[in-house]
Amino acid sequence: MRIVVLAGGIGGARFLRGLKRAAPDADITVIGNTGDDIHLFGLKVCPDLDTVMYTLGGGINEEQGWGRTDETFHLKEELAAYGVGPEWFGLGDRDFATHIVRTQMITAGFPLSAVTEALCDRWKPGVRLIPMTDDRVETHVAVTLPDSGADAGPGERKAVHFQEYWVRLRASVPAEAVVPVGAEQAKPAPGVLEAIAEADVILFPPSNPVVSIGTILAVPGIREAIADAGVPVVGLSPIVGDAPVRGMADKVLAAVGVESTAAAVAEHYGSGLLDGWLVDTVDADSVTRVKAAGILCRAVPLMMTDLDATAQMAREALTLAEEVREA
Ligand code: FO1
């Protein structure tokens, strides 16, 4: 079975671990979000690709869900001693090595997709990991920063990089708009459209529907290829009981005018894209609303508390895909 998964960071990576357990013989292609990528200290950092690669390759810091296990921060401290920041973004020494290799290869002329393949030669994630595009796409968030001055006037409206919104500001101010800068001109990376066309099933893990899956779908050609693939497309809600399981999805959902509920996220994707949707058992009463939107829906436990629970979620998604096929 050929499975294509669109993945953001932590939620996508953990789901993939369960999927690999649930379908050990499947041929899994992961299309990774690169809208979170950021250039720091002259290096290209790809948080979501790395989170998938480290999680499936056994190098992830399990507690925080991103970055390397057994990490130290000497390099960052030395840079800070020179007054070189940003200090708010936690890059560890081991992680730095990945960004140095990636940047060196890109500078030498290799596309990000080839670089990712080379990095995965070391980590052996057991899936084919492809960035959504080789082109530069950066998600920016429009915010109004509160005025901290004495004459508290209206705050400053500006666009900040997604990482600045997420990590430095901790999504503490409303996201007024979310813009995947460069997405409109981007082309799907080699292998993306082919994998979608050859898939038997396409899965949306419980990743952020706006800044993770939404950004991947914003690359021209990807949404259309999924909609036209003619195979079941099944998603798992990242919202459980009206709140994101992890992260701050509610903040960016508000920016696109979508309420923070499992049913609203399914409607946001729409029946033109999505065939099946899993909601958590606590959201069982939203099944009727999702079905009314033309999307097959089941309520099952959706908390990725451990590998067994996550593998069971993946099995439920594959079962729902079969039901879609038979419907
Ligand atoms: N998340 C944080 O909350 N704080 C950090 O300092 C931080 C650094 C970081 C460095 C490398 C990396 O691959 C991921 C990192 N993340 C950090 C996670 C990242 O900001 C987001 O969780 C994802 O971009 C959203 O998927």
Image (cartoon, rainbow, N blue to C red):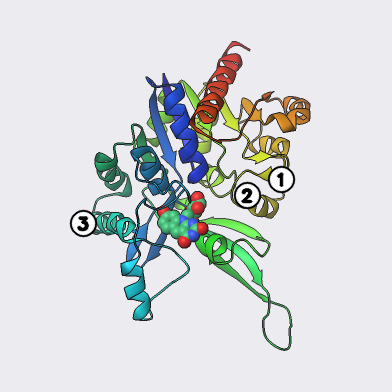
Q: Which x, y percent locates residue 10?
A: 49, 45
Q: Residue at x 60, y 35 (%)?
A: 303
Q: Amino acid at mark 1?
A: Ser
Q: Are marks 1 and 3 in contact (CB under 8 Å)?
A: no
Left or right: where does residue 45 sit relative to residue 22?
left
Q: Residues within 10 Å of mark 3 (few under 14, many from 20)?
A: few
Looking at the image, tell me whether mark 1 or mark 2 is earlier in sequence order. Answer: 2
Q: Amino acid at mark 3?
A: Ala
Q: Find the distance from the CA under tag 2 to the CA under tag 3.
A: 36 Å
Q: Quadrant of residue 80?
A: bottom left
Q: Which x, y percent locates residue 160?
A: 55, 66
Give the vertical position of 101 relative to 295 (above or below).
below
Looking at the image, tell me whether mark 2 or mark 3 is earlier in sequence order. Answer: 3
Q: Find the distance from the CA under tag 1 to the CA under tag 3.
A: 44 Å
Q: Residue at x 57, y 27 (%)?
A: 234
Look at mark 3 in the image and give the residue it sits on. Answer: 108
Left or right: where does residue 134 sit relative to residue 320?
left
Q: Are marks 1 and 2 in contact (CB under 8 Å)?
A: yes
Looking at the image, tell me whether mark 1 or mark 3 is earlier in sequence order. Answer: 3
Between tags 1 and 3, which lies in front?
1
Look at mark 1 in the image and give the residue it sits on. Answer: 260
Look at mark 2 in the image and give the residue it sits on. Answer: 249
Q: Which x, y percent locates residue 78?
A: 32, 74
